[in-house]
Image (cartoon, grey):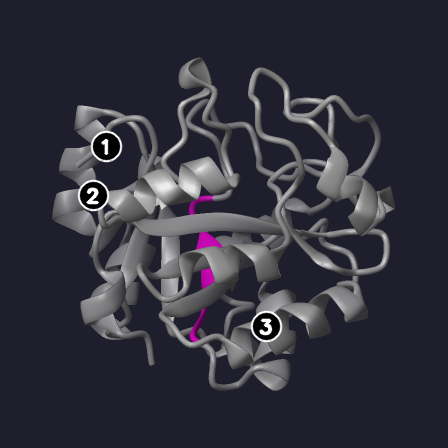
């Protein structure tokens, strides 16, 4: 199960980053800043071309780096040399490098990114190997329940969770409009695909709280509920009332 004492604390979304100060999300300076204040770390995992787990949020490189194209077309050696925009730091971290840096000092929530296709076997195996051998509080999560069902088999001893919400933005537009049907979005929002993953926790969109589904997670299933991404005072109040720990950005607790 998830170690509530270790994990239920403020979690810095993609590390304690600040673009204005040159501290880029999902990089070592952002993670060190979070560790210095005792915050947990949320990060994102994407595959390199050979499946090596890299710490990066986007599927494309352009927003944050001087590179172009998809991250899963990038060889690990190139990723290690790629400069970030507006910062002196160079190189997309590997998951192995992140875990070496954290070294058990604070909990790590690692989100496995998914494009809703079959997950890369080498990527999944690499994550499982690193997570299983890591000596520290670590949990894995994904929006895609199939990813976590696979991880249940690959790393059964590592806490796993599902990232979810209403599957609609506040303006009513659907999440993943090209990847998911309305019926599947409804099923995911109602946790209908979660059973094979046997999640130990959920991470819920703060914009959709309070919700009957989130209440069921905490009250009926008895599972911890993180909420993302807490950016405003209103978000903070909602998180305190309806979740067990905030995944925050910008507005520190």
Front disc: 3 or 2: 3
What secondary structure characterizes most of the magenta part?
A: strand
For the record, the magenta segment spans: 159-166
Q: Is residue 186 above or below residue 199?
A: above
Magenta-drawn stretch contains 165: yes
> Dots 1 and 2: beta carbons under 8 Å?
yes
Q: Position of residue 59 (x, y in %)?
A: 72, 38
Percent coordinates x, y for residue 112 in the rendering:
59, 57
- Identified at 24% across, 48% down, the residue is 10
At label 2, counting other C-alpha atoms closer than 10 Å, the crowd grade (few under 14, some 14-19, many 20 or more) is many
Of mark 3 and mark 2, the one earlier in the sequence is 3
- What residue is shown with label 1? 235
In this rendering, position of residue 130 left or right of residue 229: right
Q: Please indicate whether residue 7 sits to the left or right of residue 133 in the image.
A: left
Q: Which of the numbered marks, if any, corresponds to residue 130?
A: 3
Residue placed at 49% from the left, 48% from the top? 43
Residue 101 image offset from top left, x and y in percent: 46, 55
Q: Look at the numbered disc 3 and give the secondary structure of its residue.
A: helix
3 or 1: tag closer to the N-terminus = 3
Mark pair 3, 1: CA separation: 33 Å
SS of the residue at dot 1?
helix
Tell me if I can see residue 216 in this picture.
no
- Which residue shows up at 66% across the image and 22% down it? 63
**Can residue 142 be seen in the rendering of this structure?**
yes
Q: Check disc 2 and report the residue beneath it.
A: 239
Specify whether residue 50 is painted magenta: no
């Amino acid at each position: 199960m998830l170690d509530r004492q270790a994990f239920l604390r403020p979690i810095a979304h993609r590390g304690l980053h600040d673009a204005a100060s040159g501290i880029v999300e999902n990089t070592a300076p952002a993670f060190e800043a979070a560790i210095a204040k005792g915050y947990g770390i949320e990060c994102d995992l994407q595959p390199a071309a050979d499946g090596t787990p890299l710490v990066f949020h986007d599927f494309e490189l352009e927003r944050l780096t001087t590179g172009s194209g998809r991250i899963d077309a990038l060889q690990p050696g190139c990723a290690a040399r790629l400069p970030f925009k507006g910062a002196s730091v160079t190189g997309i971290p590997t998951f192995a490098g992140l875990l070496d840096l954290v070294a058990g000092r604070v909990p790590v929530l690692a989100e496995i990114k998914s494009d809703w296709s079959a997950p890369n076997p080498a990527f999944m195996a690499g994550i499982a190997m690193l997570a299983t051998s890591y000596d520290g509080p670590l949990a894995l999560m994904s929006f895609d329940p199939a990813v976590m069902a696979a991880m249940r088999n690959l790393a059964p001893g590592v806490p796993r969770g599902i990232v979810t919400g209403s599957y609609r933005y506040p303006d009513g537009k659907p999440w993943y409009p090209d990847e998911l049907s309305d019926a599947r979005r409804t099923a995911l929002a109602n946790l209908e695909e979660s059973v094979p993953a046997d999640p130990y926790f959920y991470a819920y969109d703060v914009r959709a709280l309070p919700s009957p589904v989130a209440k069921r997670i905490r009250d009926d299933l008895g599972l911890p509920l993180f909420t993302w991404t807490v950016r405003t005072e209103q978000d903070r109040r909602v998180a305190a009332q309806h979740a067990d720990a905030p995944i925050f950005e910008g507005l520190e607790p």
